[in-house]
Image (tube, rainbow, N blue to C red):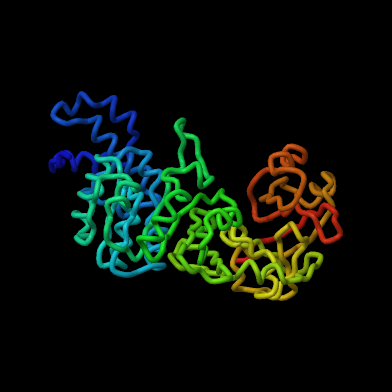
Amino acid sequence: MRIYTETEKQFIVEHLHEQPAALMLQARRYPQLPVAELVQQIQARQKAMTKLPRWAANPELRFPANISVEQSSSEATAAFKATLVSGNLLADLTGGFGADSYYFSKSFEKVVHVEQNQELSEIANYNFGVLGAANIQAIATTAAQFLDSFTGHADVFYLDPARRGDRSEKLHLLQDCEPDILNLLPILLQKADKVLLKASPMLDIDLAIAQLGKVAKVWVVAVQNECKEVLYLLQQNPPAQIVREAINIKADGSISTFTFTSEHEQTINPPYSDPLDFVYEPNAAILKAGAYKSLTQHYNVSKLHPNSHLYTSAIVVSDFPGRIFRCVGTSRYNKKELLARLPHKQANITVRNFPDTVASIRKKTGIREGGNLYLFFTTDMHQKPLVVYCEKLT
């Protein structure tokens, strides 16, 4: 891998926020530079600015093709994962760009970064040097080949199987991803104490637990209320009840956590109510984890309907893990009645357990997006369509 000159690095820094296509049109102005290659670096950094801001801003780092950046963990999720496990040796068997390996290196004496793409392995190894992560060893091989030749014993194997098919379609079933974790699992648990698996947020958690077996714990990780990762910890002798943690990493870096078990969730008979003074919408991690009834017990709130996953209370619950609203009224799903309450024909709309989509509601009613009013189109405890008018609490 060629090391960039100071002039080439400066070109990347100076043009980092410009349009790549426009830069290519100006290539003749820089006959001494490999403009196409440098523009690729700029393009990859631009894609990484949100999920890997510190890396994107570091002129010394090298970036791979865009697809590898897209599939990389974010700094926030990689840093969080590094708090879940620790020990002497972790092998990242799907190393990729190396963000996860880098953060794991802060929790382990040694990390092995395994990546089958030779160029990507070289880029990651170079970046580890730049970042001062001297305890990471990069090996260019497949996960299966590494496991065949590995004669030691690891504390943890980490895998984030590739979830894109031959035609770049997104995959989520375990058996469709590469490497096939279901085939590798016996040897993984033979050669490591624990396996930490990152799976698609689209994969049903109960299905994954049934397929994997030996699941000890599940984390559902959202970043600013957008579900990003579901992590499964596997070990030879898991506990009888699998703990699930719903994690929401907020914009300020603080973390909201809700912990429960599926077994306890099933024993709860939640209270139901018509909308009271306050309405709550759980964060995305809780909804994905399935803590629908546990919330009512922990926060003393009532559900509007078994399948709506909206909650209400007469007294505000300020630490509820999600959005909190003041209820200012309700109405039927009727265009005339709706517009009578919306003089500017403007509101933020959410549907929960409702037959129409947001787009369909806007088309039928003419309500534009925006404003300070939030409308929840849902089904109430009496099985009737309901519109709940809310103002967001800050």
Residue in front for this viewpoint, 128 or 254: 128
Residue in front for this viewpoint, 286 or 46: 286
Residue in front for this viewpoint, 100 or 370: 100
Res. 75 image quadrant:
bottom left
Res. 285 image quadrant:
bottom right
Q: Residue at x 72, y 47 (%)?
A: 344
Residue 50 in the image: state x and y as whole percent. Answer: 40, 50
Q: Number of numbered discs present?
A: 0
Question: In the rendered view of the protein, which quadrant contains the C terminus?
Answer: bottom right
Question: In the rendered view of the protein, which quadrant contains the N terminus?
Answer: top left
Viewed as shown, does residue 17 lie left or right of 84? left
Viewed as shown, does residue 158 lie left or right of 244? left
Height in image: 286 above or below 68? below
Residue 192 in the image: state x and y as whole percent. Answer: 36, 62
Can residue 44 be seen here? The reply is: yes
Q: Residue at x 56, y 50 (%)?
A: 203
Residue 317 in the image: state x and y as whole percent. Answer: 65, 74
Viewed as shown, does residue 79 lie left or right of 371? left
Res. 119 image quadrant:
top left
Can residue 56 be seen here? The reply is: no
Viewed as shown, does residue 254 lie left or right of 290? left
Residue 129 in the image: state x and y as whole percent. Answer: 19, 54
Height in image: 275 above or below 378? below
